Image (spheres, rainbow, N blue to C red):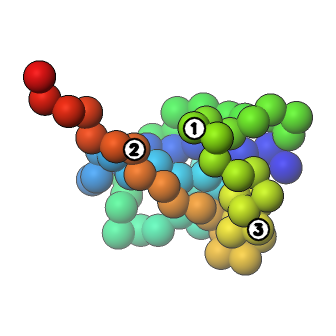
Amino acid sequence: MRLYVFRSDVKSELRAFAADAEGTKLPDRFRPWQSIGMIAPEKRPPHNLPRDQIEKSITDCGFQLWRMKKAKAD
């Protein structure tokens, strides 16, 4: 499965994976979503996130959400 990666404009640390380039099944409450990349089927997702769980969530729900850690202030 090709994974499309999105970032929420409402919550800057929120990211999502979807199976379509438009992110049509992403949750409305975090829209707008900005497309930030694509992961080919043979490539690993970022941050060692488990591809099998991502794909299961997309199959079951249409998307998979995840959060980036906020950068620590110096």
Q: What is the three-letter code of the residue carrying label 2?
A: Met
Task: Pick the quarter of the image with the C terminus.
Answer: top left
Crowd around label 3: few <14 · some 14–19 · many ≥20 (10 Å): few
Q: To which residue does mark 1 refer?
A: 47
* Residue at image location 57% in from the left, 38% down from the top: 47
Task: Spot the residue most to the top.
Answer: 74
- Distance from the alpha carbon under mark 2 to that under mark 3: 21 Å
Question: Mark 2 or 3 closer to N-term?
Answer: 3
Q: Residue at x 85, y 49 (%)?
A: 1
Front: mark 1 or 3: 1
Q: Secondary structure at mark 2?
A: loop
Q: Earlier in the sequence, mark 1 or mark 3?
A: 1
Query: Residue 42 is drawn in which quadrant?
Result: top right
Nearer to me, 30 or 66: 66
Along the line of sight, the residue nearer the viewer: 53 or 37: 53
Q: Residue at x 37, y 58 (%)?
A: 31
Residue 4 in view here: no
Disc 1, disc 3: CB below 8 Å?
A: no
Q: Would you name the residue on which mark 3 appears? A: 56
Identify the amino acid type marked 1: His
Which amino acid does the dot numbered 3 rest on? Answer: Lys
Where is residue 60 drawn, in percent x and y?
73, 77
Q: Look at the picture and state if 61 lies above or below 41.
A: below
Q: Which residue is mark 2?
A: 68
Q: Is residue 59 left or right of residue 9?
A: right
Q: Position of residue 73 (x, y in %)?
A: 13, 29
Element marked by disc 3: helix
Residue 59 coordinates in the image, percent (x, y):
77, 70
Residue 1, compared with residue 57, is above or below; it is: above
- Residue 19 shows which numbered tag? none
In the image: residue 49, left or right of residue 36: right
Q: Is residue 69 above or below residue 61?
A: above
